[in-house]
Protein backbone atom coordinates (compact mmCIF):
# COMPACT_ATOMS: atom_id res chain seq x y z
CA UNK A 1 0.00 0.00 0.00
CA UNK A 2 1.40 3.40 -0.94
CA UNK A 3 2.21 5.94 1.76
CA UNK A 4 -0.22 8.80 2.32
CA UNK A 5 0.88 12.38 2.92
CA UNK A 6 -0.69 15.54 4.29
CA UNK A 7 0.32 19.20 4.41
CA UNK A 8 0.29 21.38 7.51
CA UNK A 9 0.16 25.01 6.41
CA UNK A 10 1.49 27.13 9.28
CA UNK A 11 1.00 30.90 9.14
CA UNK A 12 3.22 32.78 11.59
CA UNK A 13 3.67 36.48 12.18
CA UNK A 14 6.45 36.88 9.60
CA UNK A 15 6.09 33.93 7.24
CA UNK A 16 4.11 30.90 6.10
CA UNK A 17 5.52 27.38 6.12
CA UNK A 18 4.23 24.35 4.22
CA UNK A 19 5.12 21.08 5.95
CA UNK A 20 4.66 17.81 4.02
CA UNK A 21 4.32 14.85 6.38
CA UNK A 22 4.07 11.07 6.04
CA UNK A 23 0.93 10.06 7.93
CA UNK A 24 2.40 6.65 8.79
CA UNK A 25 5.19 7.95 11.03
CA UNK A 26 5.17 11.76 11.07
CA UNK A 27 8.36 12.07 9.04
CA UNK A 28 8.77 15.46 7.37
CA UNK A 29 9.35 14.90 3.68
CA UNK A 30 9.87 18.59 2.90
CA UNK A 31 9.36 22.05 4.34
CA UNK A 32 9.29 25.40 2.57
CA UNK A 33 9.10 28.87 4.14
CA UNK A 34 7.98 32.09 2.44
CA UNK A 35 8.39 35.51 4.06
CA UNK A 36 5.64 38.12 3.67
CA UNK A 37 7.16 40.86 1.47
CA UNK A 38 4.67 43.63 2.28
CA UNK A 39 4.89 42.90 6.00
CA UNK A 40 8.69 42.83 5.87
CA UNK A 41 8.61 46.27 4.24
CA UNK A 42 6.52 47.56 7.16
CA UNK A 43 3.50 48.39 5.02
CA UNK A 44 0.15 49.16 6.69
CA UNK A 45 1.74 49.20 10.16
CA UNK A 46 2.39 51.94 12.69
CA UNK A 47 4.23 50.45 15.69
CA UNK A 48 4.04 53.72 17.64
CA UNK A 49 0.25 53.40 17.58
CA UNK A 50 0.37 49.60 18.09
CA UNK A 51 -1.15 49.18 14.62
CA UNK A 52 -0.14 45.95 12.87
CA UNK A 53 -1.99 45.00 9.69
CA UNK A 54 -1.24 42.47 6.96
CA UNK A 55 -2.34 42.32 3.34
CA UNK A 56 -3.97 38.98 2.34
CA UNK A 57 -1.86 38.89 -0.81
CA UNK A 58 1.13 38.13 1.43
CA UNK A 59 -0.75 35.07 2.63
CA UNK A 60 -2.16 33.91 -0.69
CA UNK A 61 1.10 34.32 -2.57
CA UNK A 62 2.92 32.60 0.29
CA UNK A 63 0.41 29.75 0.21
CA UNK A 64 1.05 29.05 -3.45
CA UNK A 65 4.81 29.37 -3.27
CA UNK A 66 5.23 27.30 -0.09
CA UNK A 67 3.05 24.38 -1.21
CA UNK A 68 4.66 24.26 -4.63
CA UNK A 69 8.01 24.36 -2.85
CA UNK A 70 7.40 21.25 -0.74
CA UNK A 71 6.02 19.32 -3.70
CA UNK A 72 9.06 20.16 -5.78
CA UNK A 73 11.50 19.35 -2.97
CA UNK A 74 9.85 16.07 -1.98
CA UNK A 75 8.97 14.72 -5.44
CA UNK A 76 5.88 13.17 -3.83
CA UNK A 77 3.15 12.52 -6.44
CA UNK A 78 0.15 14.81 -6.07
CA UNK A 79 -2.16 11.78 -5.86
CA UNK A 80 -0.55 10.77 -2.55
CA UNK A 81 -1.20 14.14 -0.87
CA UNK A 82 -4.55 13.53 0.80
CA UNK A 83 -5.28 16.60 2.91
CA UNK A 84 -4.32 20.10 4.04
CA UNK A 85 -4.99 21.89 7.31
CA UNK A 86 -4.31 25.58 7.93
CA UNK A 87 -3.16 27.03 11.24
CA UNK A 88 -2.68 30.76 11.74
CA UNK A 89 -2.04 33.43 14.32
CA UNK A 90 -5.08 34.69 16.16
CA UNK A 91 -7.13 36.55 16.82
CA UNK A 92 -6.39 38.02 13.38
CA UNK A 93 -9.72 38.94 11.75
CA UNK A 94 -10.29 40.59 8.38
CA UNK A 95 -13.37 42.13 6.71
CA UNK A 96 -14.81 40.29 3.70
CA UNK A 97 -17.44 40.97 1.04
CA UNK A 98 -20.55 38.89 0.26
CA UNK A 99 -18.44 36.29 -1.54
CA UNK A 100 -16.02 35.92 1.34
CA UNK A 101 -13.22 37.81 -0.36
CA UNK A 102 -11.04 40.20 1.60
CA UNK A 103 -11.93 43.86 1.09
CA UNK A 104 -8.23 44.52 0.54
CA UNK A 105 -8.50 42.61 -2.76
CA UNK A 106 -10.91 45.30 -3.97
CA UNK A 107 -9.00 48.15 -5.70
CA UNK A 108 -11.02 50.67 -3.70
CA UNK A 109 -9.52 49.30 -0.45
CA UNK A 110 -6.19 47.96 -1.72
CA UNK A 111 -4.10 50.37 0.36
CA UNK A 112 -6.46 50.87 3.31
CA UNK A 113 -5.04 49.36 6.53
CA UNK A 114 -8.56 49.04 7.97
CA UNK A 115 -9.43 46.65 5.15
CA UNK A 116 -6.45 44.45 5.96
CA UNK A 117 -6.12 41.58 8.38
CA UNK A 118 -5.85 42.98 11.92
CA UNK A 119 -2.89 40.99 13.24
CA UNK A 120 -2.98 39.36 16.68
CA UNK A 121 -0.48 41.89 18.07
CA UNK A 122 -2.48 44.94 16.94
CA UNK A 123 -3.54 46.79 20.10
CA UNK A 124 -5.41 49.72 18.60
CA UNK A 125 -8.63 48.48 20.23
CA UNK A 126 -7.64 48.92 23.88
CA UNK A 127 -10.49 51.35 24.57
CA UNK A 128 -13.01 49.07 22.87
CA UNK A 129 -11.84 46.09 24.95
CA UNK A 130 -12.24 48.15 28.12
CA UNK A 131 -15.77 49.06 27.03
CA UNK A 132 -16.68 45.44 26.32
CA UNK A 133 -15.42 44.39 29.74
CA UNK A 134 -17.34 47.16 31.51
CA UNK A 135 -20.63 46.50 29.73
CA UNK A 136 -20.32 42.71 30.08
CA UNK A 137 -20.17 43.11 33.86
CA UNK A 138 -22.79 45.84 34.28
CA UNK A 139 -25.50 45.46 31.62
CA UNK A 140 -27.62 43.21 33.81
CA UNK A 141 -27.55 40.07 31.69
CA UNK A 142 -25.17 37.19 31.06
CA UNK A 143 -21.45 37.95 31.36
CA UNK A 144 -20.36 36.71 27.94
CA UNK A 145 -16.68 36.95 28.89
CA UNK A 146 -16.90 34.31 31.60
CA UNK A 147 -15.59 31.44 29.46
CA UNK A 148 -12.73 33.62 28.22
CA UNK A 149 -11.17 34.25 31.59
CA UNK A 150 -13.56 37.04 32.54
CA UNK A 151 -11.51 39.72 30.74
CA UNK A 152 -11.85 40.50 27.04
CA UNK A 153 -8.70 41.61 25.22
CA UNK A 154 -7.89 44.22 22.60
CA UNK A 155 -6.17 41.36 20.74
CA UNK A 156 -9.50 39.65 20.04
CA UNK A 157 -12.26 39.53 17.46
CA UNK A 158 -15.05 41.86 18.66
CA UNK A 159 -12.86 44.64 20.05
CA UNK A 160 -10.90 44.82 16.79
CA UNK A 161 -14.03 44.92 14.64
CA UNK A 162 -15.60 47.56 16.87
CA UNK A 163 -12.50 49.74 16.58
CA UNK A 164 -12.33 49.46 12.79
CA UNK A 165 -16.01 50.20 12.12
CA UNK A 166 -15.91 53.21 14.42
CA UNK A 167 -12.81 54.51 12.67
CA UNK A 168 -13.74 53.76 9.05
CA UNK A 169 -17.33 54.13 7.86
CA UNK A 170 -16.48 53.00 4.32
CA UNK A 171 -15.07 49.70 5.57
CA UNK A 172 -18.10 49.25 7.83
CA UNK A 173 -20.45 49.76 4.86
CA UNK A 174 -18.50 47.38 2.61
CA UNK A 175 -17.78 44.59 5.12
CA UNK A 176 -20.52 42.00 4.69
CA UNK A 177 -18.87 39.70 7.22
CA UNK A 178 -15.58 39.10 9.04
CA UNK A 179 -13.37 36.02 9.11
CA UNK A 180 -10.51 34.88 11.26
CA UNK A 181 -7.33 34.36 9.27
CA UNK A 182 -7.57 30.54 9.60
CA UNK A 183 -11.14 30.58 8.27
CA UNK A 184 -10.30 32.94 5.40
CA UNK A 185 -7.44 30.82 4.04
CA UNK A 186 -9.53 27.66 4.41
CA UNK A 187 -12.40 29.33 2.52
CA UNK A 188 -10.05 30.34 -0.28
CA UNK A 189 -8.69 26.81 -0.62
CA UNK A 190 -12.11 25.21 -0.98
CA UNK A 191 -13.50 27.97 -3.19
CA UNK A 192 -16.21 28.96 -0.72
CA UNK A 193 -18.05 32.08 -1.88
CA UNK A 194 -20.65 32.26 0.88
CA UNK A 195 -19.42 33.24 4.36
CA UNK A 196 -22.71 31.99 5.82
CA UNK A 197 -22.02 28.38 4.79
CA UNK A 198 -18.33 28.15 5.70
CA UNK A 199 -17.46 25.80 8.57
CA UNK A 200 -15.90 28.18 11.09
CA UNK A 201 -13.14 27.20 13.51
CA UNK A 202 -14.28 26.19 17.01
CA UNK A 203 -10.85 27.20 18.28
CA UNK A 204 -11.09 30.76 16.93
CA UNK A 205 -14.75 31.28 17.80
CA UNK A 206 -14.57 29.90 21.32
CA UNK A 207 -11.35 31.52 22.48
CA UNK A 208 -11.67 34.92 20.79
CA UNK A 209 -15.26 35.63 19.67
CA UNK A 210 -17.30 34.82 22.83
CA UNK A 211 -18.87 31.77 21.18
CA UNK A 212 -20.28 29.19 23.59
CA UNK A 213 -22.84 26.46 23.13
CA UNK A 214 -24.62 27.37 26.39
CA UNK A 215 -25.99 30.60 24.89
CA UNK A 216 -26.54 29.25 21.41
CA UNK A 217 -23.32 30.42 19.78
CA UNK A 218 -22.31 34.08 19.61
CA UNK A 219 -23.67 36.69 22.04
CA UNK A 220 -27.15 37.93 21.11
CA UNK A 221 -27.92 41.11 19.19
CA UNK A 222 -29.28 42.67 22.36
CA UNK A 223 -25.78 42.60 23.86
CA UNK A 224 -23.77 43.40 20.72
CA UNK A 225 -26.03 46.34 19.87
CA UNK A 226 -24.98 48.06 23.07
CA UNK A 227 -21.64 48.81 21.39
CA UNK A 228 -22.60 49.59 17.79
CA UNK A 229 -25.58 48.81 15.51
CA UNK A 230 -23.12 47.25 13.05
CA UNK A 231 -22.18 44.51 15.53
CA UNK A 232 -25.81 43.57 16.05
CA UNK A 233 -26.44 43.32 12.31
CA UNK A 234 -23.13 41.52 11.77
CA UNK A 235 -24.24 38.66 14.00
CA UNK A 236 -26.66 37.50 11.30
CA UNK A 237 -23.77 37.36 8.83
CA UNK A 238 -21.39 35.28 10.92
CA UNK A 239 -22.24 31.79 12.26
CA UNK A 240 -23.95 29.84 15.03
CA UNK A 241 -22.34 26.43 14.67
CA UNK A 242 -18.59 25.85 14.85
CA UNK A 243 -16.39 22.86 14.03
CA UNK A 244 -13.28 21.20 15.41
CA UNK A 245 -10.27 20.74 13.15
CA UNK A 246 -10.67 16.99 12.75
CA UNK A 247 -13.61 17.83 10.45
CA UNK A 248 -13.54 18.42 6.71
CA UNK A 249 -14.26 21.95 5.58
CA UNK A 250 -14.45 20.71 1.99
CA UNK A 251 -12.18 19.71 -0.87
CA UNK A 252 -9.61 21.73 -2.74
CA UNK A 253 -11.24 23.88 -5.40
CA UNK A 254 -10.33 23.21 -9.03
CA UNK A 255 -8.70 26.63 -9.20
CA UNK A 256 -6.41 26.04 -6.22
CA UNK A 257 -5.81 22.43 -7.26
CA UNK A 258 -4.46 23.72 -10.58
CA UNK A 259 -2.43 26.48 -8.94
CA UNK A 260 -0.83 24.14 -6.41
CA UNK A 261 -0.48 21.06 -8.61
CA UNK A 262 -2.67 18.92 -6.34
CA UNK A 263 -5.80 16.84 -6.86
CA UNK A 264 -9.24 18.44 -6.38
CA UNK A 265 -9.96 15.39 -4.20
CA UNK A 266 -7.55 16.76 -1.59
CA UNK A 267 -9.40 17.23 1.70
CA UNK A 268 -9.18 20.62 3.44
CA UNK A 269 -9.70 20.45 7.20
CA UNK A 270 -11.38 23.12 9.30
CA UNK A 271 -8.78 25.73 10.25
CA UNK A 272 -7.23 26.33 13.66
CA UNK A 273 -4.82 28.57 15.56
CA UNK A 274 -1.09 27.93 15.52
CA UNK A 275 -0.66 27.41 19.27
CA UNK A 276 -3.46 24.87 19.45
CA UNK A 277 -2.01 22.96 16.51
CA UNK A 278 1.38 23.25 18.21
CA UNK A 279 0.00 21.61 21.33
CA UNK A 280 -1.18 18.69 19.21
CA UNK A 281 2.23 18.49 17.52
CA UNK A 282 3.84 18.51 20.98
CA UNK A 283 1.89 15.45 22.21
CA UNK A 284 -0.41 17.28 24.61
CA UNK A 285 -2.12 15.24 27.31
CA UNK A 286 -3.99 16.02 30.50
CA UNK A 287 -1.93 17.79 33.22
CA UNK A 288 0.63 18.84 30.60
CA UNK A 289 1.40 22.50 29.94
CA UNK A 290 2.51 23.16 26.37
CA UNK A 291 4.43 26.40 25.90
CA UNK A 292 4.56 27.49 22.27
CA UNK A 293 7.34 30.05 22.34
CA UNK A 294 7.93 32.51 19.55
CA UNK A 295 7.37 36.25 19.27
CA UNK A 296 4.71 35.75 21.93
CA UNK A 297 3.71 32.61 23.82
CA UNK A 298 0.59 30.55 23.95
CA UNK A 299 0.30 28.25 26.93
CA UNK A 300 -2.08 25.40 26.21
CA UNK A 301 -3.60 22.71 28.42
CA UNK A 302 -6.46 20.25 28.10
CA UNK A 303 -8.70 18.80 30.77
CA UNK A 304 -11.71 16.53 30.87
CA UNK A 305 -15.17 17.93 31.42
CA UNK A 306 -15.40 15.78 34.54
CA UNK A 307 -12.24 17.21 36.08
CA UNK A 308 -13.03 20.83 35.23
CA UNK A 309 -16.67 20.63 36.23
CA UNK A 310 -18.27 24.05 36.47
CA UNK A 311 -15.01 25.80 37.32
CA UNK A 312 -14.38 29.05 35.44
CA UNK A 313 -10.67 29.79 35.27
CA UNK A 314 -10.13 33.50 35.74
CA UNK A 315 -7.81 35.67 33.68
CA UNK A 316 -6.93 33.24 30.86
CA UNK A 317 -7.78 33.25 27.14
CA UNK A 318 -10.67 30.87 27.35
CA UNK A 319 -11.85 27.34 27.99
CA UNK A 320 -13.41 25.75 24.93
CA UNK A 321 -14.79 22.29 24.29
CA UNK A 322 -12.79 20.65 21.48
CA UNK A 323 -10.48 23.56 20.66
CA UNK A 324 -7.36 21.37 20.99
CA UNK A 325 -8.47 17.75 21.31
CA UNK A 326 -12.08 16.95 20.36
CA UNK A 327 -13.94 15.78 23.44
CA UNK A 328 -11.64 17.63 25.86
CA UNK A 329 -11.75 21.20 27.17
CA UNK A 330 -8.94 23.31 25.73
CA UNK A 331 -7.43 25.93 28.06
CA UNK A 332 -5.37 28.81 26.65
CA UNK A 333 -3.17 31.42 28.30
CA UNK A 334 -0.07 33.24 27.05
CA UNK A 335 2.21 36.25 26.98
CA UNK A 336 1.85 39.14 24.53
CA UNK A 337 5.62 39.46 24.35
CA UNK A 338 8.25 36.73 24.60
CA UNK A 339 10.76 36.57 21.77
CA UNK A 340 9.43 40.01 20.80
CA UNK A 341 10.77 41.41 24.09
CA UNK A 342 14.27 40.20 23.29
CA UNK A 343 13.99 41.36 19.67
CA UNK A 344 12.90 44.81 20.91
CA UNK A 345 16.08 45.07 22.99
CA UNK A 346 18.21 43.91 20.06
CA UNK A 347 16.70 46.56 17.81
CA UNK A 348 17.00 49.19 20.52
CA UNK A 349 20.76 48.79 20.81
CA UNK A 350 21.53 48.01 17.16
CA UNK A 351 19.60 50.78 15.39
CA UNK A 352 22.16 53.56 16.05
CA UNK A 353 24.94 51.27 14.81
CA UNK A 354 22.93 50.28 11.74
CA UNK A 355 22.28 53.95 10.98
CA UNK A 356 26.01 54.72 11.25
CA UNK A 357 26.92 51.77 9.03
CA UNK A 358 24.47 53.00 6.38
CA UNK A 359 26.11 56.43 6.42
CA UNK A 360 29.68 55.13 6.42
CA UNK A 361 31.98 56.53 3.73
CA UNK A 362 34.49 53.68 4.30
CA UNK A 363 32.28 50.77 3.18
CA UNK A 364 30.69 49.97 -0.16
CA UNK A 365 27.01 49.00 -0.37
CA UNK A 366 27.71 45.25 -0.38
CA UNK A 367 29.90 45.52 2.73
CA UNK A 368 27.27 47.63 4.47
CA UNK A 369 24.54 45.09 3.75
CA UNK A 370 26.64 42.16 4.97
CA UNK A 371 27.73 43.95 8.13
CA UNK A 372 24.20 45.07 9.02
CA UNK A 373 22.89 41.54 8.46
CA UNK A 374 25.67 40.10 10.62
CA UNK A 375 24.93 42.49 13.49
CA UNK A 376 21.19 41.84 13.42
CA UNK A 377 21.47 38.07 13.11
CA UNK A 378 24.21 37.48 15.69
CA UNK A 379 23.56 40.00 18.43
CA UNK A 380 21.03 37.96 20.43
CA UNK A 381 23.31 34.92 20.23
CA UNK A 382 26.24 36.97 21.53
CA UNK A 383 24.19 38.54 24.32
CA UNK A 384 22.91 35.10 25.32
CA UNK A 385 26.44 33.69 25.52
CA UNK A 386 27.57 36.61 27.66
CA UNK A 387 24.50 36.37 29.90
CA UNK A 388 25.10 32.66 30.50
CA UNK A 389 28.47 33.54 32.03
CA UNK A 390 26.89 35.90 34.58
CA UNK A 391 26.21 34.05 37.88
CA UNK A 392 22.51 33.89 38.64
CA UNK A 393 23.04 35.28 42.13
CA UNK A 394 24.35 38.49 40.51
CA UNK A 395 20.90 39.19 39.04
CA UNK A 396 19.87 42.49 40.63
CA UNK A 397 18.02 44.17 37.76
CA UNK A 398 14.27 43.52 37.70
CA UNK A 399 12.34 44.00 34.45
CA UNK A 400 8.69 43.71 33.51
CA UNK A 401 7.87 41.83 30.30
CA UNK A 402 4.92 44.05 29.35
CA UNK A 403 6.56 45.71 26.33
CA UNK A 404 3.53 44.61 24.30
CA UNK A 405 1.03 44.66 27.16
CA UNK A 406 -0.11 41.67 29.23
CA UNK A 407 -2.22 38.89 27.78
CA UNK A 408 -2.53 36.62 30.84
CA UNK A 409 -3.14 36.27 33.62
CA UNK A 410 -5.68 39.11 33.58
CA UNK A 411 -5.38 40.79 30.17
CA UNK A 412 -4.33 44.43 30.22
CA UNK A 413 -2.82 45.62 26.95
CA UNK A 414 -2.39 49.15 28.30
CA UNK A 415 0.44 48.03 30.59
CA UNK A 416 4.00 49.00 29.69
CA UNK A 417 7.41 47.48 30.23
CA UNK A 418 9.74 48.80 32.91
CA UNK A 419 13.19 48.16 34.37
CA UNK A 420 14.53 48.91 37.86
CA UNK A 421 17.82 48.42 39.61
CA UNK A 422 20.16 49.84 36.96
CA UNK A 423 23.61 51.14 37.90
CA UNK A 424 26.85 51.99 36.12
CA UNK A 425 27.69 48.29 35.89
CA UNK A 426 24.47 47.43 34.07
CA UNK A 427 25.84 46.49 30.68
CA UNK A 428 23.87 45.15 27.72
CA UNK A 429 24.28 41.49 28.70
CA UNK A 430 22.95 42.13 32.22
CA UNK A 431 19.93 44.06 30.97
CA UNK A 432 19.32 41.33 28.40
CA UNK A 433 19.51 38.70 31.15
CA UNK A 434 16.94 40.64 33.20
CA UNK A 435 14.56 40.58 30.22
CA UNK A 436 15.00 36.81 29.89
CA UNK A 437 14.21 36.52 33.59
CA UNK A 438 11.18 38.79 33.12
CA UNK A 439 9.60 36.65 30.38
CA UNK A 440 10.26 33.61 32.59
CA UNK A 441 8.59 35.29 35.56
CA UNK A 442 5.64 36.12 33.30
CA UNK A 443 5.42 32.41 32.47
CA UNK A 444 5.41 31.53 36.16
CA UNK A 445 2.50 33.90 36.76
CA UNK A 446 0.50 31.80 34.28
CA UNK A 447 1.54 28.52 35.93
CA UNK A 448 0.60 29.92 39.33
CA UNK A 449 -2.84 30.97 38.04
CA UNK A 450 -3.62 27.53 36.61
CA UNK A 451 -2.60 25.85 39.87
CA UNK A 452 -4.51 28.36 42.00
CA UNK A 453 -7.60 27.51 39.95
CA UNK A 454 -7.16 23.78 40.58
CA UNK A 455 -5.59 22.75 37.26
CA UNK A 456 -2.73 20.40 38.04
CA UNK A 457 0.51 20.68 36.04
CA UNK A 458 2.77 17.62 36.04
CA UNK A 459 4.75 18.16 32.83
CA UNK A 460 5.96 21.22 30.91
CA UNK A 461 6.81 20.96 27.20
CA UNK A 462 8.51 23.75 25.28
CA UNK A 463 8.36 24.18 21.54
CA UNK A 464 8.98 26.76 18.88
CA UNK A 465 12.02 28.72 17.79
CA UNK A 466 12.97 29.99 21.24
CA UNK A 467 12.74 26.51 22.80
CA UNK A 468 14.99 25.02 20.13
CA UNK A 469 17.57 27.80 19.95
CA UNK A 470 18.02 29.42 23.36
CA UNK A 471 19.74 27.52 26.15
CA UNK A 472 19.66 30.72 28.23
CA UNK A 473 15.88 31.10 28.03
CA UNK A 474 15.12 27.42 28.60
CA UNK A 475 17.43 27.00 31.58
CA UNK A 476 16.17 30.22 33.13
CA UNK A 477 12.59 29.07 32.61
CA UNK A 478 13.29 25.68 34.21
CA UNK A 479 14.90 27.41 37.20
CA UNK A 480 12.06 29.92 37.60
CA UNK A 481 9.28 27.32 37.26
CA UNK A 482 11.28 24.78 39.31
CA UNK A 483 10.15 22.11 36.86
CA UNK A 484 11.91 20.04 34.20
CA UNK A 485 11.03 21.23 30.70
CA UNK A 486 11.04 18.85 27.75
CA UNK A 487 11.75 20.31 24.32
CA UNK A 488 9.76 18.90 21.42
CA UNK A 489 11.97 17.39 18.71
CA UNK A 490 10.04 18.99 15.87
CA UNK A 491 11.02 22.61 15.39
CA UNK A 492 7.74 23.05 13.50
CA UNK A 493 5.24 21.67 16.00
CA UNK A 494 2.30 23.87 14.84
CA UNK A 495 2.77 22.70 11.24
CA UNK A 496 3.04 19.10 12.45
CA UNK A 497 -0.10 19.54 14.55
CA UNK A 498 -1.97 20.94 11.55
CA UNK A 499 -0.81 17.91 9.56
CA UNK A 500 -2.14 15.63 12.31
CA UNK A 501 -5.55 17.31 12.11
CA UNK A 502 -5.45 16.92 8.32
CA UNK A 503 -4.75 13.19 8.63
CA UNK A 504 -7.83 12.75 10.85
CA UNK A 505 -10.04 14.90 8.62
CA UNK A 506 -9.03 12.74 5.65
CA UNK A 507 -9.93 9.55 7.55
CA UNK A 508 -6.37 8.25 7.57
CA UNK A 509 -6.37 8.01 11.38
CA UNK A 510 -9.56 7.45 13.39
CA UNK A 511 -9.11 10.31 15.86
CA UNK A 512 -6.65 12.97 16.98
CA UNK A 513 -5.13 10.90 19.79
CA UNK A 514 -4.42 8.00 17.41
CA UNK A 515 -2.86 10.40 14.90
CA UNK A 516 -0.66 11.94 17.62
CA UNK A 517 0.57 8.47 18.62
CA UNK A 518 1.45 7.60 15.02
CA UNK A 519 2.84 10.95 13.83
CA UNK A 520 4.46 12.72 16.79
CA UNK A 521 8.24 13.26 16.78
CA UNK A 522 9.03 12.95 20.50
CA UNK A 523 11.50 15.05 22.53
CA UNK A 524 15.20 15.65 22.20
CA UNK A 525 16.26 17.59 25.29
CA UNK A 526 15.26 18.15 28.90
CA UNK A 527 16.22 21.18 31.01
CA UNK A 528 16.34 20.46 34.74
CA UNK A 529 16.13 23.17 37.41
CA UNK A 530 19.36 23.98 39.25
CA UNK A 531 18.72 24.08 43.00
CA UNK A 532 20.78 27.17 43.79
CA UNK A 533 19.26 29.08 40.89
CA UNK A 534 15.76 28.14 42.05
CA UNK A 535 16.39 29.66 45.49
CA UNK A 536 17.63 32.94 44.02
CA UNK A 537 14.81 33.19 41.49
CA UNK A 538 12.18 32.58 44.17
CA UNK A 539 13.37 35.81 45.82
CA UNK A 540 13.65 37.73 42.55
CA UNK A 541 10.18 36.55 41.51
CA UNK A 542 8.72 38.23 44.56
CA UNK A 543 10.49 41.45 43.56
CA UNK A 544 9.02 41.09 40.07
CA UNK A 545 5.56 40.73 41.59
CA UNK A 546 5.92 43.80 43.80
CA UNK A 547 7.36 45.85 40.94
CA UNK A 548 4.50 44.81 38.66
CA UNK A 549 1.88 45.75 41.26
CA UNK A 550 3.53 49.17 41.70
CA UNK A 551 3.65 49.91 37.96
CA UNK A 552 0.10 48.69 37.36
CA UNK A 553 -1.21 50.75 40.27
CA UNK A 554 0.63 53.90 39.15
CA UNK A 555 -0.55 53.45 35.57
CA UNK A 556 -4.11 53.07 36.79
CA UNK A 557 -3.82 56.26 38.84
CA UNK A 558 -2.39 58.22 35.91
CA UNK A 559 -5.30 57.13 33.70
CA UNK A 560 -7.94 58.30 36.21
Image: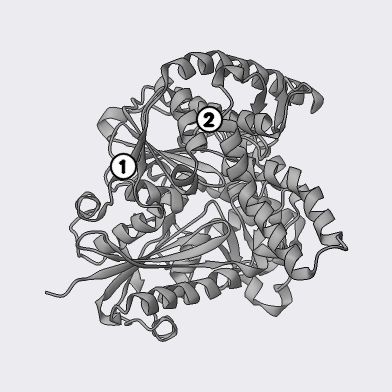
Q: Name the residue under label 2.
A: 440
Q: What element carries label 1?
A: loop
Q: State the separation of the CA atoms marked 2 and 1.
A: 21 Å
Closer to us: 515 or 234: 515
Q: Name the residue under label 1.
A: 284
Q: Badge 2: few (under 14), some or many (20 or more) residues near its Cα, within 10 Å?
A: many
Q: What element carries label 2?
A: helix
Nearer the viewer's eye, disc 2 or disc 1? 2
Q: Find residue 57 and report its image quarter.
A: bottom right
Residue at image position (59%, 62%) is: 94
- In the rendered image, the residue lying farthest to the left is 1
Residue 124's x, y, as percent?
A: 71, 48
Left or right of 77 in this view: 425: right
Where 114 sits versus 414, above or below? below
Q: Can residue 81 be seen in this view?
A: yes
Closer to us: 377 or 366: 366
Residue 551's x, y, as percent?
A: 71, 23
Closer to us: 87 or 110: 87
Residue 532's x, y, as percent?
A: 46, 15
Q: Which of marks 2 and 1 is nearer the N terminus?
A: 1
Q: Can residue 191 be seen in this view?
A: no
Left or right of 279 in this view: 537: right
Amino acid sequence: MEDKYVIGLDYGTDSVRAFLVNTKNGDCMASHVVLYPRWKAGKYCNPVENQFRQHPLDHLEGLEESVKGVLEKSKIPASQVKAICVDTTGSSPLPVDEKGQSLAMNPAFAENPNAMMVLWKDHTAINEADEINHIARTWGGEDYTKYEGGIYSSEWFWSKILHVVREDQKVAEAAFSWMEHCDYITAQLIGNEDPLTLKRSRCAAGHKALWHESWGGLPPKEFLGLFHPYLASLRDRLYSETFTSDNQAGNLSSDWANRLGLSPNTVVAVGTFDAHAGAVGGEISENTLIKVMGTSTCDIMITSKENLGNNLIQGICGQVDGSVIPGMIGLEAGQSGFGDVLAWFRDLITKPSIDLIQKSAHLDETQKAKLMEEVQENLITQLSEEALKIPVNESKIVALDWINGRRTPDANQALKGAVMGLNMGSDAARVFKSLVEAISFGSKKIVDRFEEEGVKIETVIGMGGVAKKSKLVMQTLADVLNMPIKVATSDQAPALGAAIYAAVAAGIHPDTQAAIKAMSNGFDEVYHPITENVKHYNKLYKEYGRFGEFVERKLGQSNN
